[in-house]
Amino acid sequence: MRSLADRVAIIGMGCTKFGENWDSSSDDMIVDACMEAFADAGVRPEQIEAAWVGTLTSGVSGQTLSRPLKLQYIPVTRVENMCATGQDALRNAAFAVAAGAYDLVLVAGFEKLKDSGLTGLPGSASSVIGAGNTAPGGFALAANRYFHEYGIGKETLAKIAVKNHSNGALNPKAHFQKEITVEQAMRAPMIAYPLGLLDCCPTTDGAAAAIITRRELAEKYTDRFVTIKGLGLAVGPGSGRVDENYSFTSFPETQMACRQAYEQAGITEPRRQISMAEVHDCFTITELIIYEDLGFCAPGTGAQEVDSGTFSLRGELPVNTDGGLKSFGHPIGASGLRMLYECYHQLTCRAGRRQLPNPKLALAHNLGGNPGSFTCSVVILGTPE
């Protein structure tokens, strides 16, 4: 695999407030996120040569982006790849920029879920987790197996929820901006044992956007940018739930996607080399397993690291510094770019009260589907060489 390391730069990003955006249409959110990105990059919409838009259920073509932004007659591609949709849109755009097909490209992702009136994914989108199953039910299988395998309990998951809500309380764009206690998380209404209400991310509306260009052109637009160091995407065979050897305590798709990204970025010791990570905490158990699959700690030791504060905002390797899906919710097409929005602002030292000291490499991770059948994306950003 040829590496894209330092060949593509992100020169501007935008993100709406995530939440129950009843007073905003999909078009409104797209315009808000993209206009912030244009202003951040110091470019005008008419300078954009091509665009990619990610959405799972809220649009059917590139016109969902071109129409509200009046991007007339340029190539606009709609991307859908389960929960990895937003990051996969960026991945495809980055390939086009690195190949020299375009100099200045827009990537956007969005989802309008609250208007569906459902508590999960609408319509046929729910089929990605398998007939007769629910997302909480699938991840509850992973939680119960992990508890059995490693002898931990629900309190570890409660501490992850507390950490992410604490970070989200510092973020004005988060859906939930309120701290919680371990006791509240432990006593929350049960959804699918052992996952309670505060172990699950909410149903949310939101949009996010990025402006990318080739590295050698970045300084033409701005002196404040980051570069893509590595891109990984792994699509599993979908057979885990019928494989009697499937463990449920580890997700091979995460391991394969991060292996691709690490190789491109030259990462051999992720815990030491990565400054921060945004991971797909659709459920608290998911974040716990992701720590281990990304190589941040050994299998079965995640609970000890949670207890020691390793992944807290001021810990050795902060995870979900913006509050994660737990605080932001999960508008599918927007989530991956929202993660990159946080990485971008941390790396350019504009994260406000959440700012980390001198970060150099940031990782963003998306996981779509259900245990046994995932699509996983990993993107690594860094400060330019």
Image: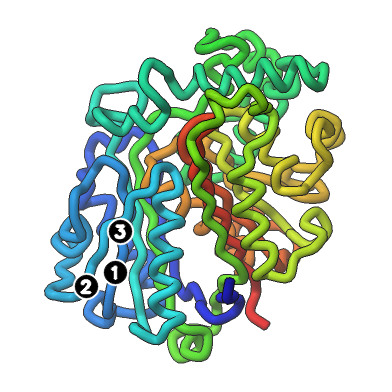
The residue at the point 47 percent across, 89 percent down is 217
Give the position of the C terminus as an image quadrant: bottom right
Q: Which circle's residue, 1 or 2, is located before the other in the chain?
A: 1
Say which amino acid is labelled 3.
Answer: Val
Residue 99 screen position, x and y as percent: 42, 83
Q: Secondary structure at mark 3?
A: strand
Q: Is residue 89 left or right of residue 51?
A: right
Secondary-structure class at tag 2: loop
Residue 53's disc number? 3
Within-10-Å neighbours for mark 1: few <14, some 14–19, many 20+: many
Location of residue 204 by image quarter: top left
Q: Which residue is mark 2?
A: 75
In 3D space, how far apart are the residues under numbered discs 2 and 3 (Cα atoms)? Answer: 11 Å
Callouts 1 and 3 close, C-beta under 8 Å: yes
Q: Amino acid at mark 1?
A: Ala
In three-dimensional space, the C-alpha distance between marks 1 and 2, rounded to whole angstroms, equals: 6 Å
Viewer-side residue, 155 vs 321: 155
Q: Where residue 215 appears, x then y in whole percent?
A: 52, 84
Amino acid type, label 2: Pro
Q: Is residue 263 left or right of residue 207?
A: right
Instruction: Provide the residue designation for mark 1.
Output: 51
**Looking at the picture, does residue 46 appear above or below residue 307?**
below
The residue lying toward the viewer, choosing from 366 and 225, is 366
Residue sitting at x 74%, y 59%:
274
